[in-house]
Image (cartoon, rainbow, N blue to C red):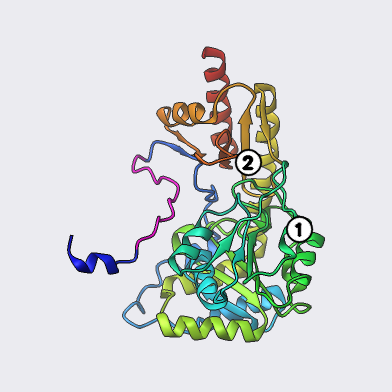
Amino acid sequence: MAAWSDNIRKVEPYVPGEQPKDTDVIKLNTNENPYGPSQRVKNVMMDIDTLRLYPDPTASALVDVLAEYHGVDPSQVFVGVGSDDVLAMSFLTFFNSDKPILFPDITYSFYDVWAELFSIPYERPALDENFRLVKENYYRENGGIVFPNPNAPTGIYEDIKNVEDIVSHNKDSIVIVDEAYIDFGGESALGLIDKYDNLVVVRTFSKSRSMAGLRIGYAISDPVLIKALNDVKYSYNSYTMNRPSLIMGTESVKDDEYFKETVSKVVATRERFVEAIKPLDFTCLPSSANFVFATHKDIPAKEIFQAAKDAHIYVRYFDKPRIDNYLRISIGTDEEMDKFTEFLTNYIQER
């Protein structure tokens, strides 16, 4: 082995949900929205004549419309290429202490990847037996805190009072609340932004706004923290967002009626699906997301996962401690969920 191989950064990468090339599948494994984006987005999709030009590095049109939508100043908004980009940039910007950052033992599995990539020490306080945050575990000295609300992959929402307790007990640390799924249930931490200058709230267009393919994410925080994020961004890649994403993202925010309509449809289908699989001896954790985390009384999750895949139905299975007997099932259309329920019924009966 050549000597230079010792200098290559080695990390265990994040493993995303499978993207099947076969289009004849029911895809319930990556928490995409089953409904297309707003008609306003579709109306500007062909506006590509300006692709010869660099995009606006400040993303001002999108920043301004997000600021207006959330009732904050544009200086409080940062945008990036999906919430993953925003979160990674936040790790790089804010987590530079010798003290360990804290995030749950069961959570979004990109957190430990970024921590390893950026050589950030970290600890993972355990969720309780009901998969809920133990807020007191975050009252100790740390180099920063990050957690999703609702959590992934459990879908469980933590009451905003518990979120505020964690933020208020850590005024010397940056606390990042990852709200990728908040539109599907629960109260956002955005109402705490002006009260706490150490809070960063991260959101995405990939789930509730049906735009996973365009990669749009954003953070809202104190202007000082947003400036720090932008300083790091401009030192890394000043043109992170492409023109189509900026144009279509701006139009999406302007169509609030369609946004709320599709979110309501997903929530209604989620509740309908949970009730439909109860008689099949499935138990679902209480979900406030666009997916459910389900386990069967007798049949191993891995077995159901493989059988469903063989039937061209994709769900997500995590071979990890404490959750290796659960399936994460994204919510599709009513028709897709009915077909999946039919598959489960037949599989259980014939097993």
SS category of the residue bearing label 2: strand
Q: Is residue 202 left or right of residue 56?
A: right
- Which x, y percent locates residue 248? 49, 69
The mark found on residue 341 in the picture is none
Residue 287 visible here? yes
SS category of the residue bearing label 1: helix
Above or below for 64 versus 118 = below
Tag 2–tag 1 contact (CB < 8 Å): no
Q: Is residue 102 left or right of residue 45?
A: right
Highlighted magenta segment, given as a residue range: 10-22
**Residue at 65% from the left image edge and 55% from the top image edge:** 125
* Residue at the spot of label 2: 292
Return the residue found at the far left.
2
Q: Is residue 227 left or right of residue 17?
A: right
Q: Nearer the viewer, residue 188 or 52?
A: 188
Q: Nearer the viewer, residue 36 or 167?
A: 167
* Front label number (2 vs 1): 1
* Residue at the spot of label 1: 135
Residue 211 visible here? no
Tell me the kind of residue under disc 2.
Answer: Val
- Which x, y percent locates residue 47? 40, 72
Magenta run includes residue 14? yes
Disc 2 to disc 1, C-alpha distance: 23 Å
Taken as a whole, is the magenta stretch helix, strand or loop?
A: loop
Q: Is residue 319 left or right of residue 253?
A: left
Q: In terms of image quadrants, where is residue 8?
A: bottom left
Above or below for 311 versus 98 = above
